[in-house]
């Protein structure tokens, strides 16, 4: 790589073909490029230290790397993903060029990848999809909404439509998947410059890529070298970028740090000697003075050399064909470069024609890359004499691209601009040069320049559907406001522009840039009587402000703004989204008060004329079902598909409140559970009158869930299947409920009628579906359901613990409520207590992951109640497995209020009832208090009745639990053998181990060492196979006398050898059993 320093008519050009003073840094980068390993390089340095030049200097292409770079700009800090968008567009172009002759399967994989993420990314990187469309037109890409349609969107938007879209972390994961795929054929160098100007969403993606490089290297993805450059002082002002850099530094591997210092005298002397073609010993005195003037900053050195060359300090001898210079002491006449960059650039610009100078001044406002098309439009406007020599001149009036190219080329020869070989565009050679060029615009002319550019960019952005122009236009108008004396508010038109840019950011899930634009929009509005004179704009602005503040956790501010909207709104529908913000505030935070959420929802429905009882009177369900059937087309559920789409705003608001809020909150509260069914039926009745909405299928699913709770499993399954069928009525898009309904059907209905093994697969697929839709918090909840099912089917514990670590990170990153994050801790600590061999008290959730008492201190109200319930559930499981009945007694007392609880979520309820039943029967025999023995026996019998009833209704997962509980209710060898055989056939190794242990203890009480030795031996091997090595070792030590003759090297149950995942075949066969022969409460 050669670096041009100076090129004029005074002699041969000055250039260098290597970097001086950067040997260690180059050695590191060369090492990383040769290793072909994923890594992250953090490059810190002052402006002009050569961060960009360092990366560009390596022969990446020769080493088969794809090199791409993107730069974050101060003027584009409110445009989310700005540098990443440009990088991705370039990467896709390169990939398509390199894979023209790729196998069909490879192109098919690329198309599939894009189709999977198109809903998340099409509004963020539309250029990429246009590039791909030229090659692969069969990709189903629908053009993004025209920006023109957003201009007056506040006049016609649906105020009753709750804001739902992709979450930023889902978009980040979509970016990661694309980068991983694009790097699979050739390794990528991804250089992001000046991240101190980056937005929060870009930093989220950067950290995700860095994390992937550190912990998921080549085995799982292509090779990516992520290089990030920043200025130490500036990054301290950007909390998001600073936090990301600190997080990356904390990664255990794959992270390298480079700090670029100024050049020392010797390195600078090598540079000077190379540039002017002289010997180092000859140039040393000269270099010492240059170092004194520039402090060794590479940019300053180049500027100083160019400057003194123009001042004819250097002359080229045609006799000796060498450069000569004057007395070095005369260099003291020149000031320090850091103080005189403007003077030096002025010297360079003076050599340019007036047209080039004016083009540079205007371009200094338009970012790092010179947008020629914008300049053509700017100079096509009518010439104004007062602008002469400052903002325009007759020579550039009506200039075309070819003429501009000539002018910019002149600036390139002067070292002010460079022409990008990859983009073919002109870019500023250095940020400092751009700043200095802007300083040449007279202060009095700057507001006018920004105003004209803002208006021009806004018009061009709408005409050409270019989002970056909208963001740049907002930036220009905001600068105009800052520079105009006494003018902070420019009026409603500029407020609308900022609102439009904010909405574009919100569509990209970029909350913080959006909030900044919304606040500027509010500042620009005419404050007097804005609710009267500019009602629509004010309403649109304020509701977006409230929703955005709520999403980023500024709940009090959000509710305050929502109250302001409600006080000034003209109609109930105009209040709707503000009411939703207030409603969501009830169920957020550490106290998840769902009962209050139900009550507030009922109050809102009452405002819409919808009266709902808090309790149903006897026979009301039958009455409501009859009314619903009369309204359904053809009297059948399938008739819903014949209905038109719901368009009435009031009906949509009611539907939203009924389904998204009343059904959800009622299902999660203990006090109002029956209201969930009533709300679902009401929602379907509304649909019959006003048409289907995208969430009507959730009402069908809500009815299915209540049918399951009432024991109508077959009908519930039918309704759930139909809810899934209804999904095809509405298209998939970010935030859509397709994945939500699928996994909801699994967790609330199908888990009762299908094998847990099949449910495990459905949950894995559903989680991926939710992530693709951007519903990351819902995906986290499904991770918990997956963990519950995983344990329920007895799969090895170690892989689950590894998965849970990642899921827990997701929960934190995705902003899940802390009560949800806590459950991952409970799972992990319980697994570690089972697996580790030196746990002091394995029935306490205390260890390297968590401390149960400290976790309880972090929550309050209803949230604390749920957390305590979950802690006691896991402790009860551990108490049963570790044979600690004193703890089991204490914990079961704490769970007593949940004995009769009915839960919508099957898997959690299944686990709790299972161990409550096992503990109840065991404590009914060992508890010293006779009254408590009766109570625990009653609990055990209730749990047995629950599972027996489940079998009668059609549950295929209840049978092994029934056999276990029957063995514990009236222990005998026959019943234990039956339970052991049932669990073994179904692959429930953990339950088989437990039953073997319980059988062994049964024979210990009878004094039968032979059978107790046999069953203990089986239990130890099976616990080991499950991965519960802590339990297996404890059991071995406790029974060392009995086991002295046993060999535990081989499993006594050869049917389980080599099992990685159990088959559902045995459970599927149970479907043909006539469950009616099981009477309620039967022990047979």
Image (cartoon, rainbow, N blue to C red):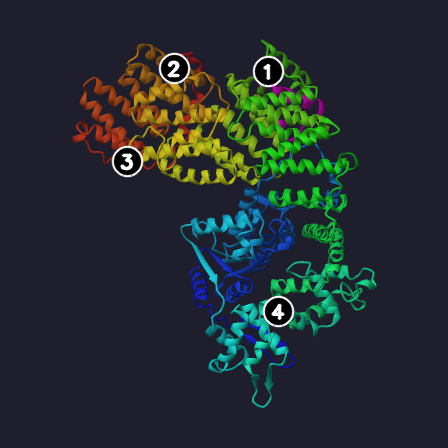
Mark nearer the N terminus (4 vs 2): 4
Q: Is residue 964 visible?
A: no
Question: Which residue is denoted by mark 2 in the rendering?
Answer: 939
Q: How would you rate the neighbour count of disc 1 (Cα within 10 Å): few for under 14, some for 14-19, many for 20 or more?
A: some
Mark 3 and mark 4: span between their CA atoms?
Answer: 70 Å
Considering depth in this image, is 391 or 157 the residue closer to the camera? 391
Which tag is nearer the camera, tag 4 or tag 1? 4
Question: Which residue is denoted by mark 3 in the rendering?
Answer: 837
Image position, residue 901 (x, y; %):
47, 18
The residue shown at (55%, 80%) is 329
Question: Which residue is denoted by mark 4 in the rendering?
Answer: 340
Which tag is nearer the camera, tag 4 or tag 2? 4
Mark 3 and mark 2: span between their CA atoms?
Answer: 32 Å
Q: Which mark is residue 614?
A: 1
Mark 1 falls on what kind of element? Answer: loop
Mark 4 and mark 2: span between their CA atoms?
Answer: 86 Å
Tell whether 499 sits left or right of 827. Answer: right
Mark 2 and mark 1: span between their CA atoms?
Answer: 30 Å
What's drawn in magenta, residue-wise?
Answer: 677-696
Image position, residue 95 (x, y; %):
56, 57
Mark 1 and mark 3: span between their CA atoms?
Answer: 52 Å
Mark nearer the N terminus (4 vs 1): 4
């Amino acid at each position: 790589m050669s670096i041009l320093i100076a090129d004029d008519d005074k002699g041969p050009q000055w250039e260098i073909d290597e970097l001086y003073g950067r040997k260690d840094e180059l050695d590191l980068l060369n090492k990383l490029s040769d290793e072909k390993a994923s890594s992250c390089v953090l490059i810190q340095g002052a402006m002009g230290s050569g961060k960009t030049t360092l990366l560009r200097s390596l022969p990446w292409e020769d080493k088969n790397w794809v090199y791409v770079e993107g730069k974050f700009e101060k003027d584009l800090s409110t445009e989310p993903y700005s540098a990443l968008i440009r990088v991705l567009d370039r990467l896709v172009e390169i990939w398509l060029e390199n894979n023209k002759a790729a196998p069909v399967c490879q192109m098919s994989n690329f198309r599939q990848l894009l189709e999977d993420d198109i809903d998340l990314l099409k509004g963020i990187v539309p250029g990429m999809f246009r590039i791909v469309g030229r090659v692969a037109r069969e990709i189903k890409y629908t053009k993004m909404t025209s920006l023109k349609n957003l201009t007056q969107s506040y006049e016609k938007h649906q105020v009753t439509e709750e804001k739902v879209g992709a979450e930023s972390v889902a978009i980040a994961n979509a970016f990661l998947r694309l980068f991983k795929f694009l790097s699979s054929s050739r390794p990528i160098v991804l250089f992001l410059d000046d991240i101190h100007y980056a937005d929060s969403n870009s930093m989220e993606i950067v950290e995700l890529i860095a994390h992937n490089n550190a912990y998921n290297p080549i085995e799982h993805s292509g090779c990516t070298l992520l290089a990030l450059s920043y200025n130490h002082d500036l990054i301290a002002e950007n909390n998001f970028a600073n936090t990301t850099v600190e997080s990356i530094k904390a990664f255990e591997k794959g992270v390298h740090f480079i700090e670029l210092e100024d050049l020392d005298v010797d390195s600078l002397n090598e540079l000077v000697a190379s540039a002017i073609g002289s010997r180092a010993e000859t140039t040393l005195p000269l270099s010492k003075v240059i170092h004194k003037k520039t402090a060794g900053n590479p940019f300053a050195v180049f500027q100083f050399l160019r400057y003194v060359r123009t001042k004819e300090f250097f002359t080229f001898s045609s006799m000796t064909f060498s450069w000569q210079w004057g007395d070095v002491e005369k260099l003291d006449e020149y000031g320090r470069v850091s103080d005189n960059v403007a003077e030096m650039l002025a010297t360079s610009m003076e050599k340019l024609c007036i047209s080039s100078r004016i083009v540079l001044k205007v371009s200094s406002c338009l970012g790092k890359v010179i947008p020629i098309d914008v300049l053509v439009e700017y100079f096509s406007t009518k010439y104004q004499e007062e602008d002469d020599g400052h903002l325009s001149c007759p020579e550039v009036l009506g200039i075309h691209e070819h003429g501009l190219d000539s002018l910019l080329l002149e600036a390139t020869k002067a070292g002010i601009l460079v022409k990008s070989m990859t983009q073919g565009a002109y870019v500023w050679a250095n940020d400092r040069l751009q700043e200095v060029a802007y300083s040449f615009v007279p202060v009095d002319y700057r507001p006018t320049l920004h105003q004209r550019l803002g208006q021009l960019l806004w018009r061009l952005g709408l005409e050409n559907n270019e989002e970056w122009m909208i963001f740049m236009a907002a930036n220009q108008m905001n600068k105009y406001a800052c520079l105009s004396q006494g003018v902070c508010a420019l009026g409603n038109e500029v407020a609308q522009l900022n609102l439009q840019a904010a909405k574009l950011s919100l569509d990209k899930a970029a909350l913080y840039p959006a909030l900044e634009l919304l606040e500027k929009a509010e500042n620009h509005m005419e404050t007097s009587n804005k609710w009267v004179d500019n009602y629509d704009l004010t309403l649109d602005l304020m509701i977006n402000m409230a929703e955005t503040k709520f999403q980023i956790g500024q709940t009090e501010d959000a509710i305050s703004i929502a109250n302001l909207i409600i006080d000034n709104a003209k109609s109930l529908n105009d209040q709707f989204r503000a009411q939703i913000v207030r409603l969501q505030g009830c169920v957020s935070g550490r106290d998840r008060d769902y009962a209050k959420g139900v009550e507030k929802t009922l109050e809102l429905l009452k405002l819409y004329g919808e009266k709902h009882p808090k309790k149903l009177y006897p026979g009301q369900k039958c009455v409501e079902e009859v009314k619903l059937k009369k309204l359904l087309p053809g009297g059948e559920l399938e008739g819903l598909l014949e209905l038109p789409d719901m368009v009435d705003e009031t009906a949509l608001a009611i539907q939203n409140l009924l389904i998204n809020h009343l059904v959800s909150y009622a299902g999660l509260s203990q006090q109002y559970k029956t209201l969930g069914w009533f709300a679902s039926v009401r929602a379907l009745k509304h649909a019959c009158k006003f048409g289907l909405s995208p969430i009507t299928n959730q009402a069908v699913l809500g009815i299915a869930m209540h049918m399951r709770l009432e024991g109508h499993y077959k009908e519930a399954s039918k309704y759930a299947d139909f809810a899934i069928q209804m999904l095809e009525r509405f298209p998939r898009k970010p935030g859509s409920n397709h994945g939500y309904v699928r996994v909801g059907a699994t967790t609330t209905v199908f888990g009762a009628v299908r094998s847990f093994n099949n449910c495990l697969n459905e949950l894995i697929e559903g989680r991926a579906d939710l992530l693709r839709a951007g519903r990351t918090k819902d995906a986290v909840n499904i991770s918990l359901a997956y963990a519950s099912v995983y344990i329920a089917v007895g799969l090895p514990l170690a892989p689950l613990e590894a998965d849970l670590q990642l899921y827990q990170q997701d929960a934190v990153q995705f902003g899940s409520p802390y009560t949800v994050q806590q459950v991952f801790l409970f799972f992990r600590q319980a697994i570690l207590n089972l697996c580790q061999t030196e746990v002091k008290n394995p029935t306490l959730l205390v260890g390297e992951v968590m401390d149960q008492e400290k976790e309880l201190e972090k929550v309050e109200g209803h949230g604390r109640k749920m957390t305590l319930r979950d802690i006691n559930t896991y402790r009860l499981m551990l108490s049963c497995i570790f044979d600690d009945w004193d703890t089991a007694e204490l914990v079961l007392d704490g769970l007593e209020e949940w004995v009769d609880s009915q839960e919508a979520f099957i898997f959690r309820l299944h686990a709790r009832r299972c161990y409550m039943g096992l503990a109840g029967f065991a404590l009914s025999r060992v508890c010293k208090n006779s009254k408590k023995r009766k109570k625990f026996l009653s609990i055990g019998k209730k749990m047995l009745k629950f599972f027996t009833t489940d079998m009668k209704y059609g549950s295929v997962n209840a049978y092994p639990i029934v056999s276990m509980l029957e063995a514990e209710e009236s222990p005998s060898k026959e019943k234990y053998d039956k339970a052991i055989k049932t669990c073994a056939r179904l692959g429930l190794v953990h339950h088989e181990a437990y039953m073997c242990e319980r059988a062994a203890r049964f024979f210990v009480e009878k004094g039968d060492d032979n059978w107790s030795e046999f069953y203990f031996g089986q239990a130890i091997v099976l616990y080991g196979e499950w991965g519960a090595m802590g339990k297996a070792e404890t059991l071995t030590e406790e029974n060392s006398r009995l086991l002295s003759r046993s060999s535990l090297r081989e499993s006594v149950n050869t049917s389980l050898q080599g099992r990685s995942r159990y088959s559902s075949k045995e459970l599927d066969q149970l479907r043909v059993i006539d469950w009616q022969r099981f009477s309620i409460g039967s022990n047979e």
